[in-house]
Amino acid sequence: MTEQLGRFGDFGGRFVPEALIAALDELDAARTDAMADPAFTEELARLHRDYTGRPTPLTEVPRFAEHAGGARVFLKREDLTHTGSHKINNVLGQALLTVRMGKRRVIAETGAGQHGVATATAAALMGLDCTVYMGEKDTRRQALNVARMRLLGAEVIPVAHGSATLKDAINEALRDWVTNVEDTHYLLGTVTGPHPFPTMVRDFHRVIGDEAHDQLRAVTGGLPDVVCACVGGGSNAMGIFQRFRDESSVRLVGFEAGGEGVETGRHSARFSTGEPGVLHGAATYVLQDEDGQTLDSHSVSAGLDYPSVGPEHAYLRDTGRAEYFPVDDDEAMEAFALLCRTEGILPALESAHALAGALRVGRESDPGTVILVNLSGRGDKDVETAAQWFGLTGDAHATSATAGHPPAGEHRSATAGHPPAGEHRSATAVHPPAEGVES
Amino acid sequence: MTALDTVFTTCRDEGRAALMTYLPAGFPDNQGSREAMVAVAEAGADIVEVGVPYTDPLMDGPVIQDAADRALAGGFRVRDLLGNVEAVASAGAVPVVMSYWNPILRYGPDAFARDLASAGGAGMITPDLIPDEAAQWRAAADTHGLAPIFLVAPSSTDARLATTTAACRGFVYVASTMGVTGTRTTVGAGARQLVERTREVTDLPLCVGLGVSTGDQAAEVATFADGVIVGSALVRALGDGVEAGTGLGPLRDLTVELAEGVRRA
């Protein structure tokens, strides 16, 4: 036994009940063996090609980039995968491992529902039983994905305990796993949890950065100057960062959910106000009070609404290799609307945080800076949330959702025209431009 | 000889198993939880586990989750548990703390060990801290004369049974079954088998927890274990008493039944 198992500096490890250690050891052995076995890696590559739809495109977005201070912006289109987000990369890998380990049931947690949908999909494909735990609050704001999972044959269990969001879904999944570990694999959806999950999930997602690196080189002949990704647990970010972390010229920037604003206390900005601690099996940054009790997190985006973060991000942050900044709800929603109207791409609310970050980074940087953004998911699931946000539902008089073509670099209104009476929320809240970024 | 050693020696001399009862601090409130812990000590508990309410208790079933939520909603602070520890010690039982790791990490492991020892605590059970990750805690416990108590589970390999028990002091917490806390209709065969496997590698007392709720179950477990641990059933009895206005009556009655059970074997 080593104290250093699965450690990233001071972070990571295995802070779980003894009952799970045997299963974690089994999983670690299975994934190490599988990744060295061409039969496994070729089957995974075949699935990614024929089922997931890989490689996903790299799309340059010049009309969006007009608002990014003269930067060139490229989107890695994980939104175009089967099931609509990067989550499928990890899910297919772990589902194949489940079969390889001779287990017949998978369980998963889900926040926005994207990981749950991907898991239900892989379970259907491979004939596995599937149970998905989802915070009750999230089942309401992501009702479409609940129906999708059930259509795919999964059992969806709403978790009403605690804050009824992602963290409570993970608690419940861990309770299920410790009870049924003999025939069940916990198909954890992000780069946190006990070793080997952070490493394994990162490795299943590194295909994102590997592809983007080659695709970008084919267009620009070089490396990106900056790589931007949103960070909830942090799997899409680790997936795209991994290929570039040894390229010292490339800035790696993660964007957390600033919610209603870091100063309000209603946010998910672990790196702004969190402290090192332990949650869900890993030592990492945690939103916690002075007694070590976990604080509730907040974000308009269910997938970023999590009080902890993958331990390798904590390591990248403390070593200075990657930077992390909060993006609040208003700013993310503006970027969401901007991408819709300038490029005809509807991003997930999670990914909209990365887009907002890219706008900021672009405005701060020299013209011509090449920014690679991981567009981790599509926004179909978020249409209702966005429509409510911008006052576009029902018989609202939202006849004009556009504000014309402001010059590059200027702040842009996402709504104009005629807001409906009552609950209209404007996305025009003024944010400080680039120099207002802080962390 | 430590307080824990004395308890197990006494029980052995009396030809019985020890009764260990779990109750959360702060439930239904600080004062009520201390009175409850004194009540179980007076009704026959040898060791009282003082549980630390935590927001994310992933080893606990609904009964203990709900009690923890209520304690936290009532403003429970981790330092409040020291009052429970003192109350248990004054009532003549041996107090040990049971806590998830993050509250202790936040308090500071050495400061916590110091304060727990000076309040009269004998050790701490850590359901989500395995010895492999516990270097800091083991050092702090050693400095302040506290027993670090780790869990073994049915899935533990023989090699892990050896390393985990080697890291324990006082006793070993034997999880009777794969799962979380809560009452079960049967506890038997798997627990007996794990106790037998664990005896191969340690001379420490072995206490069986998870699932025991009745005097009969306690009597059955007492035939093969050195201690019987009861949690959820007592927390429920305490909650029922609070709800029904019967106070500590149901809790006392169940404790008396369990104390009779561990003496029946």
Image (cartoon, coloured by chain):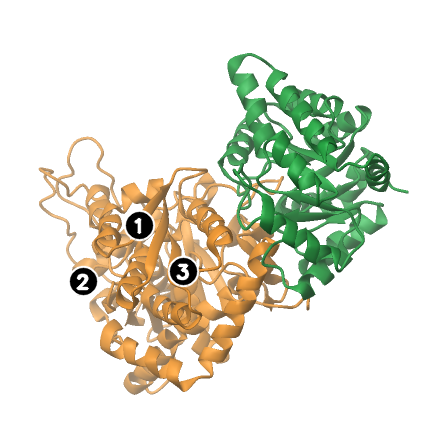
Chain colours: A orange, B green
Decide: marks 2, 3 in contact (CB < 8 A)? no
What is the chain identity of the residue bearing mark 1?
A
Q: Horizontally, is B170 left or right of A176 in the view?
A: right
Point out the residue furthest to the right here: B1
Q: Identify the residue at image location x=55%, y=57%.
A: A20
The answer to whether residue B224 is above or below residue A40 is above
Q: Residues within 10 Å of mark 3 (few under 14, many from 20)?
A: many
Foreground pick, A139 / A264: A139
Q: Earlier in the sequence, mark 2 or mark 3?
A: 3
Q: CA distance from mark 1 to mark 2?
A: 39 Å
Label 1 vs label 2, nearer the camera: 1
Decide: marks 1, 2 in contact (CB < 8 A)? no
Using the rendered image of the protein, determine whether residue A387 is visible from the camera's viewpoint: yes
Q: Earlier in the sequence, mark 3 or mark 1?
A: 1
Q: CA distance from mark 2 to mark 3?
A: 31 Å
Q: Earlier in the sequence, mark 1 or mark 2?
A: 1
Quarter of the image for the N terminus of chain B: give it: top right
Q: Which mark is residue A155?
A: 1
Q: Horizontally, is A275 left or right of A355 in the view?
A: right
Foreground pick, A92 / A11: A92
Check disc 2 and report its element: helix, strand or loop. helix
Check disc 1 and give the amino acid type: Glu
Residue A228, quarter of picture = bottom left
Which residue lies under the disc numbered 2? Answer: A342
Q: CA distance from mark 3 to mark 1?
A: 17 Å
The answer to whether residue A254 is above or below residue B240 is below
What is the x, y in percent for residue A113? 31, 53
Which residue lies under the disc numbered 3? Answer: A189
